[in-house]
Image (spheres, rainbow, N blue to C red):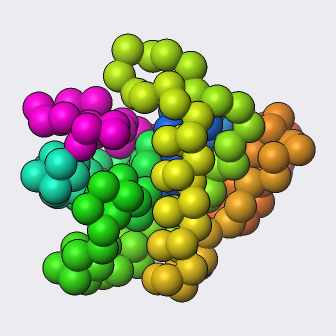
Amino acid sequence: MSAPAAKGSKVKIAFIGTHGVGKTTLCFDLASRLKRLDLGVDIVKEVARRCPLPINQDTTLDAQAWILHTQIADEITARAQYDAVICDRSVLDNYAYLVNRVGRKPEYDALVRGWIGSYDGLFKVPVLQAPSFDGTRDVSQSFQLEIDAVLDTLIDAFHVKAHRLDAADRPGWVDAVLQVMGLPFVPPQIDLFATA
């Protein structure tokens, strides 16, 4: 897994995990740090929130197919326009909701397996607490943990290299991502006193 060391390179990072674990906050925290490195940054927001079909425990195969394909389309668009793309979910954890509802499907196994290689970094966000009500996502902790378990199963089944963020070091998560990706923690300083 390689990462851009200079402006002009492209990188796509996804935070994976069940709902209610803080992926969205983490996306914005990382985006802020990357902008300070003078990178053009976009966040691919959680597409399930825009789905016109039922989600959560009432989801359907059609709903999850819409979510998977919309996720891919949004990632393609963002990657074409920005140096750094941060995804609030990946196709893998979107697929976990489909698998939880209707089981694995060979055609979606192939789609997800093929697309997972497009990420330069995947970071698994651990469950620290039950989900809180946000107007969209299910607040059942048992459902939250079901999805987390399905996701772990898929990570193993697809041999995905996902870096697991340390549950005991929430404040250090962004630094951990920067370190794994080989990105600087602070912007390079210009030497105002350098002589030619």
Quarter of the image with the N terminus is bottom right
Q: Position of residue 36 (x, y in %)?
A: 62, 35
Task: Tell me if 117 is positioned left or right of 101 in this view.
Answer: right
Residue drawn where x is 46% and y is 82% of the image: 158
Q: Residue at x 81, y 52 (%)?
A: 166
Along the line of sight, the residue nearer the viewer: 119 or 41: 119
Side of 37 where 8 appears, left or right: left
Asked whether residue 79 appears in the rendered view, the answer is no
Q: Position of residue 148 (x, y in %)?
A: 56, 54
Residue 110 seen in the current view: yes
Q: Quadrant of residue 117?
A: bottom left
Q: Which residue is situated farthest in the right direction here?
A: 168
Front one among 100 and 69: 100
Kindly identify the residue that appears in the image at 10 percent across and 52 percent down: 62
Residue 142 among those drawn in magenta:
no
The percent coordinates of residue 74 (x first, y second) are 23, 48
Task: Measuring from the top left, give residue 110's x and y in whole percent.
Answer: 25, 82
Q: Which residues are magenta?
A: 38-59
For residue 40, side relative to residue 195 (left or right)? left
Residue at the (38%, 14%) spot, across then down: 135
Q: Is residue 188 left or right of residue 140?
A: right
**Number of residue marks:** 0
Which of the image's four quarters has the C terminus? bottom right
* Nearer to me, 13 or 141: 141
